[in-house]
Amino acid sequence: MDKSDKRGRFFMEKPKHHLFICSSSRVSGEPKGVCIRKDARDLILYVQTELNDRGMSDCIVSNTGCLKLCDHGPVMVIYPEGYWYGNISEDTIDQILDALEEGNSVEELLIQ
């Protein structure tokens, strides 16, 4: 996703999709909360691996602090679409990425 301008300066292109996954981290850096206890770190790595395997280089993944939806954790948000998914797992991530590749959401997995 990196490109260079006419002067050879590198910049990052705006991603088509930005996936945020709650990792329950706090400003102090201490992980607390539901998402981290439900293996959010492993899910972040899984999403990154899946995106690479699928050739979805126009997407980036970021971990976030608490998204305040602990009852639905782990939580993933996809922008610019504004999709909020709860209780994500490797299986649901596969469904979500399949739909994202087709330009759709997985309605039954969205947080209402």
Image (cartoon, rainbow, N blue to C red):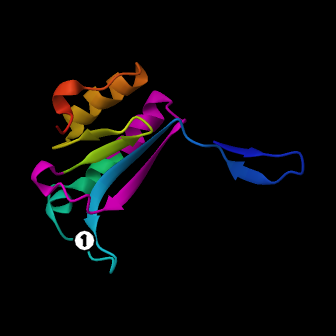
Side of 49 where 112 appears, left or right: left
Q: Residue at x 28, y 60 (%)?
A: 23
Residue 87's x, y, as percent?
15, 44
Screen quadrant of the N terminus:
top right
Residue at the bottom extreme of this rendering: 28
Q: Is residue 14 visible?
A: yes
Secondary element type, mark 1: loop
Does 87 appear above or below 34? above
* Nearer to the camera, 111 or 98: 111
Residue 110: in magenta span:
no
Q: Which residues are magenta?
A: 46-73
Query: How many other residues sit within 10 Å of disc 1, few (<14), some (14-19) or many (≥20)?
Result: some
Q: Is residue 41 visible?
A: no
Residue at the right extreme of this rendering: 7
Q: Residue at x 53, y 35 (%)?
A: 16
Q: Quadrant of residue 91?
A: top left
Q: Residue at x 10, y 53 (%)?
A: 71
Residue 97's x, y, as percent?
35, 30
Does 25 appear above or below 11? below
Q: Which residue is mark 1?
A: 31
Residue at the front extreme of this rendering: 112
The amino acid at mark 1 is: Pro
Side of 88 where 41 appears, left or right: right
Residue 83's x, y, as percent?
32, 37
Screen quadrant of the C terminus:
top left
Q: Quadrant of residue 9?
A: bottom right
Residue 64: in magenta span:
yes
